[in-house]
Image: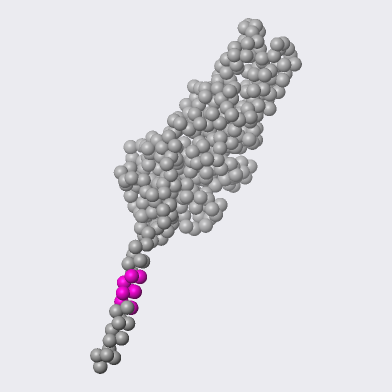
Amino acid sequence: MNELLLPVVFVILAIAVIGSLIVVLVRGRRTPPGIYPSPRDADDQGGAGVHGATSTEVLDRPDGTTTDVLVPDDLSSLDEAPPAPGLDTVDPVQGRLARLRARLIRSNNALGKGLLALLSRDRIDEDVWDEVEETLLLADLGTEPTLELVDALRERVKVAGSRDPAEVRSMLHEELVKLVDPTMDRSLATQRHADRPAVVMVVGVNGVGKTTTVGKLARVLVADDKDVLLGAADTFRAAAAEQLATWGARVGVPTVRSDVDGADPASVAFDAVKAGIEQEVDVVLIDTAGRLQNKVGLMDELGKVKRVVEKHGAVDEVLLVLDATTGQNGLTQAKVFAEVVNITGIVLTKLDGTAKGGIVVAIQRSLGVPVKLIGLGEGADDLAPFDADGFVDALLN
């Protein structure tokens, strides 16, 4: 009898040993280096993702309805806890301008090089001044600023009676800086109020890169040690909210968005600011849908977004994103947006040192609004505060 039971006992023991080994191996598995749960995975599992734990809250909309949005449970931990694995290291703001300036100097700058070549000739006659004027107009400087600059240079060159390239460059630098106007206030209104965060809306036409700009601006603010929350109010483009959430997750910034396609953008913006107030963040950045300036209905809707957000308090900044390569077309866009939402600053992208550099002057003259941020590339940290003197110095190499 014992001889018959012995093989059965061996089989049972073997199965038990194999089962134990499997359990140990499964429990011992680890996520491969560099692969971390996405924010959406963490949210679905009710755990903490790269931007902290989240929960679904019912937020009251200004029209009396409600919406379910994913909001962070705690943003204060972002200040105290070390960065979660996989978060980007953000470049300091101060170093960015120098890098962008160096890139501008290396670029094919038709404006600065063309002017210096013309003004350094042995003989400067009317033909040369006509060429200078043409160069400035091609650079999108605008008619009035062009005539001002040419008249000022004519007088200075005549009085100095010099053709020394260094002296001519100095004159040109001084006159261009005057046009770019270093006295304009280019600071961003991102200081938290006593009882609520600063609110920044980003607007513009289709295809200028608003969502990308919001993501890059979030990095600028994170580098400045600010707690930021993003609001995905571009509800028309299917991938916009996901794209914005990805930008935020890279630097530990949460995003408030609607799970309903085509949701009311004003309600989403309202919810984002409300979440920012509840979480006591420093800045709420609101991404809006791109819209053509000649579409009255869409522009009216943009005005509605701003009015609804202002139920929480005044919007501190309305930044208009413009593509520098569009030239004078950008002026038309800017004027219409300024009428609808009162633009406070310009973000000029693709300012790569080509003949379009003069658009900085033209826009500021037209709107009385400063260029506050510039971008010269597609890198995550290729956005920096605008500096008039540094910009002109780079143009003239």
* Image label count: 0
- Measured as percent of width and height from the top left, residue 249 is found at 43, 49
> Which residue occupies the extreme front position in the image?
3
- Measured as percent of width and height from the top left, residue 31 is found at 40, 58
> Which residue occupies the extreme left position in the image?
2
- Is 18 within the magenta? yes
Q: Is residue 23 left or right of residue 355?
A: left
Q: Quadrant of residue 299?
A: top right
On screen, 31 above or below 151?
Answer: below
On screen, 237 above or below 168?
Answer: below
Q: Is residue 118 left or right of residue 98?
A: right
> Which residue occupies the extreme bottom position in the image?
1
Q: Nearer the viewer, residue 86 or 139?
A: 86
Region in magenta? 15-22
- Is 1 within the magenta? no
On screen, 78 above or below 331?
Answer: below
Q: Nearer the viewer, residue 392 or 365?
A: 392
Q: Is residue 273 left or right of residue 111?
A: left
**Chief secondary structure of the magenta span?**
helix
On screen, 71 above or below 325?
Answer: below
Which residue lies at the image location 65% right of the left edge and 27% below the top edge? 110
Classify the position of the C terminus by image quarter. Answer: top right
Which residue lies at the image location 49% right of the left edge and 22% below the top edge? 183
Classify the position of the N terminus by image quarter. Answer: bottom left
- Measured as percent of width and height from the top left, residue 35 is found at 43, 54
Which residue lies at the image location 67% right of the left edge and 19% below the top edge? 117
Camera sees residue 358? yes
Camera sees residue 360? no
